[in-house]
Image (cartoon, coloured by chain):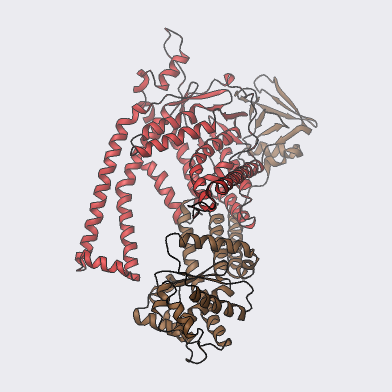
Chain colours: A red, B brown
Amino acid sequence: MQCSQRYRGPLSDASSPWTQAAAQTAAPGVPWTADLTPSRPVYDGRLGELYTIYLRHLVLMLLTLGWSRFWGRTRIRRYVWNHLSVLGDRFEYRGRGRELLIGFLLALLLLAAWGGLMYAVWVYGFHEKPFASFGLFDIFSLSVALIGFPLAYVGHYAGLRYKLTRTRWRGIRCGMAGSAWHYGAIATFLGFANAMTGYLLTPVVSVNLARPRISNTRVGTLPLAFAGGAGDIYGRYLGYYFLNILAWIVAAVVVFMAVGGTLEGLGLSFDDLGGYFAKPSLHTVALVLAAAFAAYIVFGLLILPLRCWWQAYLLRYLVSHSRAGNVLFATAITTRQMWGFLVLNYLIVLLTLGIGWPWVMHRTLKLIADQLWIYGAPESAAIRQPPDRAPGYGEGLLDMFDVSGV
Amino acid sequence: MRYYDGETAGVEAVALRVTSHELVIYRPADSSIVARWPVPELVVLGDSRHEAAPPVALRGGNARLVVEDPAWRTQLASLVPALAPLALPPIRVGRRLASYSLALVAVVGTFWGLLEYGTEYAAPLLPYSLQAKLGESVLDELLADKEECTGKVGLAAINRLANELAREAGYKHEVKVHIVEGGPVNAFTLPGSILVFYSDLIDRAKDSSQVAGVVAHEIGHVVHEHPTKGLVKAYGMDLLVKLLTGGYTDILATLGTGGNVLLAMRNGRAFEREADATGVKLLEKRGLRADGVSSFFEQMLEKEPKDAAAAAGIWSSHPPTAERIAATKRPPSGRPAFTYSEWQALRSVCK
């Protein structure tokens, strides 16, 4: 029960979701007796079963040149959702392949319309002008690269909305309020501002992008709430930021010394090295590859754990500052577990040439089931079926402008 | 058994009674009835192969009945035929994995085979106008920061030879040769019958037969449609990698690119051998000196005795130079491909 001890402290903090939940539950002057019985989600999916669905999906993908992906993705979701339960009740996925197909076709139409617009710009703006070497293809590629960045954010939000509206728990449909375009605009602006300030705004970006995603999420008529603020996590981030710079310097020095030491051992100088690079032989290429691999290892040892340390902290913060009515959440995910999630999963997919993807999904769901703590139970009678209708299609933009997992 | 009324997130533990025309859902504590569901309107949302416990519902309704106990599900399915998906026989995971893996290997093999052998037939199906547009756009990119040589007589001479050789091979489109000022000592072919020569190649050639040999070699690429075939294969390989990885993981894009490069290299070696053979054959058919191809390679080997292509093996886009010399070796007989004045004009095409 490490988690409940960890989060006993913030009860006195007015912004804490724990305090807010207490204020909501307790009448004035009456001691707080809210039910905070802990539980965790349960994932009872089996890797072998998941693989049968995934391999079938791959075979069909090849036979249909990718057009079966909408139905394959849906089947995988149906399996995963229904094997995950919270408070003893399984999730239900009610999406359909054809809805994803329609979403994709609409995104294709959007792109075609954009192509038409760019053609008009080229014909009236660039064609047979002094800078005519700037071709139609250049304009289209450049413009798609420019709109792709904000549209990927819009797609993320709209995709999340689609998945939530197709998710039911206890027969109640989940949902997501808010505008995907608004989210896309904020995310683009914050992303740009962060890049311009040397990534010193990362806590502001993380919190301000998490807030709409969390607080617009609905379980029926119950909205989730998020009580985080960037100020809370700035201290840790600055520590990470400067340690990261230090780690890069150390990594560079280690690599430089390792290369220098190897050259000295071989009786070579840096000038000789320059000579080898002028006319690279197969041995030089092999040597460069070995050096790159060694540099990657150094990078992996020094930089990635540091990033995982920050990411684990950020996730703990975001989860513990979210609540659904009087239900509170917490996680004690460690740096090592985050490393397994971010780095090991990446390596599994890479080294298995993608065939390890279901394994990664299985590991991730197990991690969620092990590490997410839920305190209390919802007031079931107060959560009602939402009156609004769900969108009829989804995920087209996500499919078009971003890679997306299941 | 758990019952959700579909209006609130409340959950009730319930029991069931099945009659011939309805499913009666009641509270076991006091036997009070929660709901009566007519059998013809019952549906199972999903099946027991994809869902651990597929919910039972009334068609179009929000209320759900979830039966966690497999024994109960089997009994229900046997009593109500509409509920059969509740108790489908479990998947034999081992057998399924084996059969899908085999199917996957077979489909990948077929796809690969189609790429390898089908490109021969698929490439010509690509409209020529599209190939030409593609080639022109690459040429535009290439010429953006380079100077193109414009000597009319020299250009006319090299274009004449290129088109004569192409016609000899029965090629029906017009070939257009561009000469770019400077190096490297190289020439290449773009889709749409576009040949690009670097002027350094012409400057360093010992005689006109060497340039004619290179022209003939490039015409070999043109008549066999190598640039388009290469593109189709590269696109096919890209598609294969994307499909095989589920289409979702950008991590593998890098690997895909790597695979593509290797494939392109292998294609490259096969294409080069074919272009060498065709080039020499076309020169001989026209009664022109055909020793230029091998003598050009000999000159390259003299300058670079350590043959990079031979050392690089499968990493090379070209076959080993010594092998190419042996394959294209011909006597210095036949008439010259260029007249003396044409050759002089070609030498000064950039001036």
Vertical position of residue A312 compared to residue A226: above or below: below
Q: Position of residue A260 (x, y in %)?
A: 21, 60
User: Which residue occupies 65% across, 40% down?
Assistant: A99
Given residues A195 and A251, the one toward you in this image is A195
User: Which residue occupies 43% across, 14% down?
Assistant: A32
Q: Position of residue B184 (x, y in %)?
A: 39, 70
Q: Quadrant of residue A176?
A: top right
| Viewport quadrant of the N terminus of chain B | top right
Vertical position of residue A27 compared to residue A327: above or below: above
Residue A93 visible to the viewer: yes
Q: Position of residue A11 (x, y in %)?
A: 37, 20
Vertical position of residue B268 compared to residue A128: above or below: below
- A118 on left or right of A24: right
Q: How many marks?
A: 0
Residue sitting farthest toward the right: B20
Given residues B231 and A381, the one toward you in this image is B231
| Viewport quadrant of the C terminus of chain B | bottom left
Residue B270 visible to the viewer: no
Q: Position of residue B44 (x, y in %)?
A: 70, 37
Residue sitting farthest toward the top: A29
User: Which residue occupies 48% across, 78% down?
Assistant: B214
- A155 on left or right of A5: right
Q: Quadrant of residue B125?
A: bottom right
